[in-house]
Image: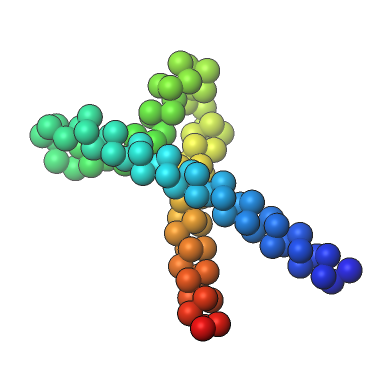
Amino acid sequence: MEKQTATWKKALFWCGYVIAGICFLLTIVAFIIGFIHHMHDTGGWRSVIQILETPITGFIKMTGGYIGKGILEVIFLVIVSYVLPIFFCFATYRLKAKRREMA
């Protein structure tokens, strides 16, 4: 029973890790697109904020208004655009540290 639980935990971790990796790549692409769009803005901090919000606003525009700016939808987009990529970076760091310890 204990081994079966450990297998499920590993499978759940790797599934989440792959999904987070995909979200990480999509967020990087959104940041690059946002940088290109707002590169010549002279708003200073305003331009930086527009670049940082590009993963959320870009997805809302991409769905053609199907996803609005409701609070739950924005929370979901923040999780997909920021929390999962942070999880991916942290998990990658931990996996590399664990590999170094084993070697």
Q: Position of residue 9 (x, y in %)?
A: 72, 62
Vertical relation: 96 (above or below) 43: below
Q: Quadrant of the N terminus?
A: bottom right
Q: Position of residue 27 (x, y in %)?
A: 40, 42
Residue at 46% across, 16% down: 64
Residue at 69% across, 62% down: 10
- From the viewer's perspective, is 64 left or right of 30? right
- From the viewer's perspective, is 37 left or right of 24? left
Q: From where the camera sits, is residue 83 visible?
A: no
Q: Position of residue 23 (x, y in %)?
A: 48, 43
- Number of marks drawn: 0
Residue at 43% across, 40% down: 26
Check the image and name the residue furthest to the front.
Answer: 103
- From the viewer's perspective, is 41 left or right of 97? left
The quadrant holding residue 86 is bottom left
Give the camera-side residue of 53 and 15. Answer: 15
Q: From where the camera sits, is residue 26 visible?
A: yes
